[in-house]
Each structure stands twice: as structure tokens, then as C-alpha cells.
Amino acid sequence: MAIKQNIVHTVAHWACAAAVITAATSSTAWAEDAHSYAKLDEVATPYLELDLNMDFAAQQLRGTATYDLLRRSDATTVHLDTRDLSISKTEIWQDNAWQETEFTLGEPHETLGQELTIEIGEESDKVRIHYATAPTASGLQWLTPAQTKSGKLPFMFSQSQPIHARSWIPIQDTPALRLTYNAEVTTPPNILAVMSANNSLDPELDGQYSFSMPQPIPPYLIAIAAGELEVEKISDKVAVFAEPYIVDEAAWEWADTPAMIEATEELYGPYRWDRYDLLVLPPSFPFGGMENPRLSFITPTVVSGDRTLINLIAHELAHSWSGNLVTNASWRDLWLNEGFTSYVENRIMEALFGERRAQMELALGYQDLLEDMKRLPPEDTVLNIELGTRHPDDVFSQVPYVKGQLFLVYLENKFGREIFDEFVRGYFDHFAFQSISTAEFKDYLQEHLLAKHPGVVSMDKINEWIHEPGLPEDAPQPTSDAFAKVEKQMQRWLKGGQLQTEDWTTHEWLHFINNLPLDISSVNMRRLDEQFNLTQSNNAEIAHAWLKLAIIKDYEPARERLRNYLLTIGRNKLVSPLYRELAKTPEDLKWAREIYQQAKPGYHPLTQTVNEDLLYPENQKQE
């Protein structure tokens, strides 16, 4: 990287970081995180320089991670998180030169990985770690050319949330830390690398790429991807990066993104990340989206051809305020990220597409939450959840998302939208670029909402929402007039009538399929399929709902599509419920295991973990 660019970055870095460090000095965000070996109250790492070489043949990243050290005590060691990393050497900057220093790796822990402890002496202000990743890194997926759409070049991408950054960077892997970073990445020829940082819209495919992220972010938002990528601009602030086969479709699908940014700024204040670009990942990506700042990672399963699944883009964009700007300090506080984001997402959808559509999406989310609560133990339906050292992946249910959202809808209903909007905007401004705990949120809520409007909502009610299982008796129960009309049509259809679906959106179809009676006859299943071709639907969400019903009803004409669906999609939200349903009978379980073994090489490690728990429960019992 050019010297001038480094100077510019350093100035920007310290301008952002100084405010964050000052704000965090008295914050519980520096408290110990049960999912990290970091000791932020002793030594923190507010700035990272990465220098990485991407080796597709070995499925490995090799290089160095260099940190500035922020000393907050007289400690002479710094503690970082790793998982399956090969550490070859550590160094400290001392007497104007790099000098090798001692390090130790702790015993492996199934959830936490290994603690990396480095001797840093009394005066050094930098540490450098030479390392390589393992091909099995939980936060990386390497795809061969044959596993990509064009079949020409390999592809790789990261997924650092919640505690997988440590599998590809030795790092203080706690959301309580905020850091800025620079990176130099080397790839094979013709492969474009991108990161959650500044990305060129006119890149030279020379295998040498430089990145800078001047805004302080938590480690789980450091992201990288590389492959055969093209760029399509949507606006001056928004562009799509994708494999050639889908770049134009995605740009058309998400054309409303600039308007979403404007709508959110109107509600909750300025967008503070400069650009908002989108990266379409291969179908094996395990999530709908990941809110990596400046470059959200998105599943291709929401490119539906009709723009009806754009609420996922609204969700990832909303994270630019809730999650990326104001971050949960630990994974116990995940609801602070996802509950606020789900609430903001719905407000964006209402602002752009009207109350009818927003209400349908809210009602569908509520239905999903009720389904999750049926299968979850009560202790996992608490917002501020007790995790211990249980893996945070285990609690990514609809609870932090939709229960958290309903809590905020409840407060909006009680205080009125105008007052609550002012509170939320103030919350984002007050805690901008900070990581906070649920306790800090409650203190802010008490001072800036409850105390200003006494007698409306008690702290006892707040505690019931946050710390008690299930939903309070007076929780909102979202419904939709549009869905009531769908249900009336459904009753007529079940008696032999016709469906009038010309104006139905994805949401109405999902409500219709998800609420069909489980005793629906095979004749009616076939009649519905023949009329609307649901088995072959190109909409991944509608296909998912129909295939799940087909499993329950043993609807044989959908079997081959179900096989292909499971073999070609790796998004957990779409495949895990299908495997869960298949696991309920011995014959289906045997068939599902055969499909899974074929699909496994193309699944992300996170998808593998979730679905092996469903399909091979006996292995879990032995552990």
C-alpha cells in the first residue's frame, strides 16, 4: 500500500478509534466475555494489519496479523483467540525493529478453540503473528471450480459470526472489541478478492489487492471472499459484486436499495459507512445474509425474479445502524443486534412498500417465532440468554430476532411512534461505534424513555420481556388483513372452489402453504401442484414451504425436486427444517442421510454441523 494511503488511513483510524476508546473506558463492554480468551481490561488490539496469501490448492490462508497494542494495565502478555491455526512465529516491535518473542497455545476447547498468549514485554506497542489456517477452518469455505456456476475458477468466502473469525485470524474474538484494519491480499491470477472494507468498482485482476476499513468494527464483521466476480453499479453509493451468471439479475432485484438507505437515514440518522455494496455468494452460503459493513454477503436464494424477497436486503442494511454501529458486547446480548435490526427492517419495508406488506412480514415472523418456541426449551426463549460456554451458534433462533422485534413493537405501541422513534434515533447516536450490554441498554432505556414518560411501562415489565421465557401475556400478536383473505380463499378451495392468486405476493403464498391443514388429501395436493406448479417453483422460499408439506404428506411427485433442492442449496434456514422433518420417520431418515452425504462436500461447515445434529443424533449422545 502506498505511504500516502497509509498515512491517511492512520489519521482516520485514530480519529475514529480515539472516540471509541474514550467511550469504552467505563463501559461493561470491556468485561470478560465467556466466549473469548481476550483480556481487554489488560491489553486490547484496536488496529489490525493483515497480509495474506490465498492458496486455493491447499485451501489455506498464510501470512501475518499485526496489531497495535492498547495497554490498560501493566500486563506483559496479550491474549488472543485461535482455532486450528498453525502459529509459526510471534514478534514484537522493539528498539525500532521486529524481535521474536515467546508464545504459548493453550489446550483445545471444543467451543472456544485455543488461547494464544504472547509475551509483549513492558514497552512494545505492536505485535506480529505469522500463521496459516487449516483447510477445515470453521469460518472459511473453499469451493472448487466444479462447485461454482461457471466451473472456471475456484471460490472462497468467510463467515466470522459469531466466533469463527478466530479460525482464520488470530484475534481477540469478542464483540466487545472494536478495531479498524488494513489488509494486503494476494490471490491467483483472474481471481478478484473483496473484503468488508473499501472495494474498487473497477479492479485490476492482478492478484494484488489492498483494503482499508477506517470505521471501528467488532471482529466478527471482518470478512473476505474471492472468485470469479463482476461488478454492477446500482447507484453512486451501491453496487453488486457477483459471479457473472447472476450479477445483472441481482442488480435488478435490489434496485430499491438506494431508496432503502434514504428511508433509513430519514428515520434513524446518517449512514456512517460511506458505501453499501452487496456480494452474491454461491448457494452454499449458510445464511440469508451477513451484514459485513460496506459489503453485505447475500444468498442467491433471494434473487427471486420479482423483488418480493428484498426484505432480506432491508435486514442487512438495517444492521448498519443496529449491530454494526451499536453492537452487542457479548453473545448473551444477541437480541440487541437482531431484535433492533428486525424492527428497523420492518420500518424500512413499511416506508417503501406500505403498511400492508410490512404487516404481512411481521405476521409471518410471528408465526415462525411461535413454531420455534414449540421446540425450544424455555431457557432458550429468554432474550438476555444464559449461555455459559455453549456455542453461540446454538441460540440463533427466531427468539433474538422476532421476540426482540416484538418487544420494540410493544414499546412503540405504548409510547407512540413519534416518541419511540426519537428514542431509537438517540440510542443509535449515543452508542455509535460502541459495544454494549443488555444492562447498559436498560439503563439508557430507563433514563431516556421510561423516566421521561412515567407510568407508561414499568421496569418490571421490561425485565419480564428481557429475562423471562416465552412471551408476556400482553405481547403484540401481529395479524394481517391480507392473510385473513387468503384463509377465506383457502376454505373455499378446500371445498372444491378456485383460488384467485393473480395479486398474491410471496408472503401470501407462504401463509397459504404454511396454514394448509395437515390432513389435506393427496388429491388436493396434486390439484394444487398441477394448477400452480409449486414443486418446480423458482422462488426458494415458496419451494421450501411446499417441500416441507410434501415431506409431511409423503407427496411422491415432489421427491426428486426435494433431492435437487437439498443438493443445490446450503442456506440453513431452507434446508435444516427439511432435514428435521425427514428425520421423523426411519425411511425418510435413511433417505435423508443418503442425500446429505452427497450434499455434504458442497455445504458450509456451519451447515454441516447443524444438520448432522439432526440426522445423526446418536453421535451427539456419545459425546
Image (cartoon, grey):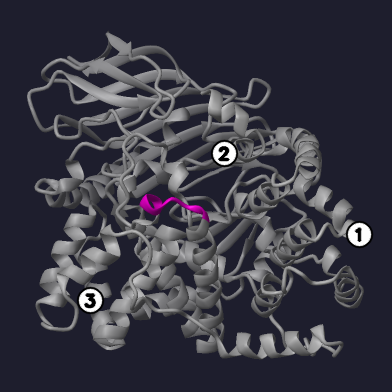
Binning the other alpha carbons within 10 Å of mark 3 as few (below 14), some (14 to 19) or many (20 upward) gives some
Q: Image height check: is 92 above or below 332? A: above
Binning the other alpha carbons within 10 Å of mark 1 as few (below 14), some (14 to 19) or many (20 upward) gives few
As measured in the structure, the alpha-carbon distance from the residue carrying label 3 to the one carrying label 1 is 53 Å
Q: Tell me which corner region of the image, top left, top right, bottom left or bottom right, holds residue 361.
A: bottom right
Of marks 3 and 1, which one's residue comes earlier in the chain?
A: 3
Residue 169 image offset from top left, x and y in percent: 42, 29
Q: What residue is rendered at 59% in x and 37% in y?
A: 613
Residue 304 image offset from top left, x and y in percent: 72, 67
As measured in the structure, the alpha-carbon distance from the residue carrying label 1 to the one carrying label 2 is 30 Å
Judging from the image, what secondary structure is the residue with disc 1 in?
A: helix
Instruction: Kindly identify the amino acid type of the residue bearing the numbered disc 3.
Output: Phe
Of marks 1 and 2, which one's residue comes earlier in the chain?
A: 1
Q: What residue is rendered at 34% in x and 34% in y?
A: 389
Residue 13 is left or right of residue 237, and the answer is left
**Residue beneath label 1, please?**
557
Depth order, front residue of 203/431: 431
Residue 184 image offset from top left, x and y in percent: 47, 33
Comparing marks 3 and 1, which lies closer to the viewer?
Answer: 1
Instruction: Kindly identify the amino acid type of the residue bearing the numbered disc 1.
Output: Pro
Q: Give the extent of the magenta segment.
A: 375-380
Q: In this orientation, does residue 277 appear?
A: yes
Of marks 3 and 2, which one's residue comes earlier in the chain?
A: 3
